[in-house]
Image (cartoon, helix red, strand yellow):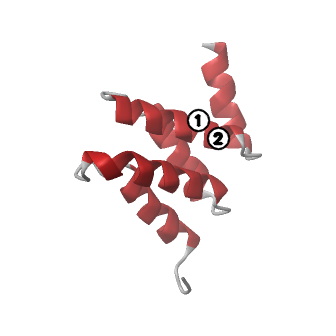
Amino acid sequence: LTGVSGADSVAYLKSLATNESLDVDVKSPIANAAIRAIAQHRDPSAVNVLIEIARSQAYSTHAASIRRQAIDGLGQSRDPRALQFLAGIITK
């Protein structure tokens, strides 16, 4: 796709990753793919979204899986904000 800003792309992917109205059979694969795509984004908003998702409450198995994906994505980032967030998790 062309003509889409990085921030808009990340926002759209976030909406897919956190969409609770999707059918159970497609929710996890779509959300996992969206989180992986966010983690590969170069836009600075991607790290913010991954941190937001990683901080979210896991009220279901699906939510816990998405949190794990977000934390994994942060672990692959070289962004200092991601490293700071992960260090905070480790030291708690």
* SS class, disc 1: helix
Near-viewer residue (81 or 56): 56
Residue at horizontal 38 percent and vertical 57 percent from the top: 16
Q: Residue furthest front?
A: 25
Q: Position of residue 85 (x, y in %)?
A: 63, 32
Q: Is residue 57 visible?
A: no
Q: Is residue 75 left or right of residue 17?
A: right
Quarter of the picture holding the N terminus: bottom right
Quarter of the picture holding the C terminus: top right
| Residue 61, image quadrant | top left
Amino acid identity at mark 1: Ile
The residues bearing labels 1 and 2 have C-alpha atoms spaced at a distance of: 5 Å
Near-viewer residue (83 or 18): 18
- Pointers 1 and 2 in contact (CB under 8 A)? yes
Residue at horizontal 69 percent and vertical 37 percent from the top: 75
Q: Position of residue 73 (x, y in %)?
A: 63, 43
Which residue in the structure is indicated by mark 1? 71
Amino acid identity at mark 2: Leu
* SS class, disc 2: helix
Q: Is residue 1 above or below residue 82?
A: below
Which residue in the structure is indicated by mark 2? 74
Q: Is residue 4 visible?
A: yes
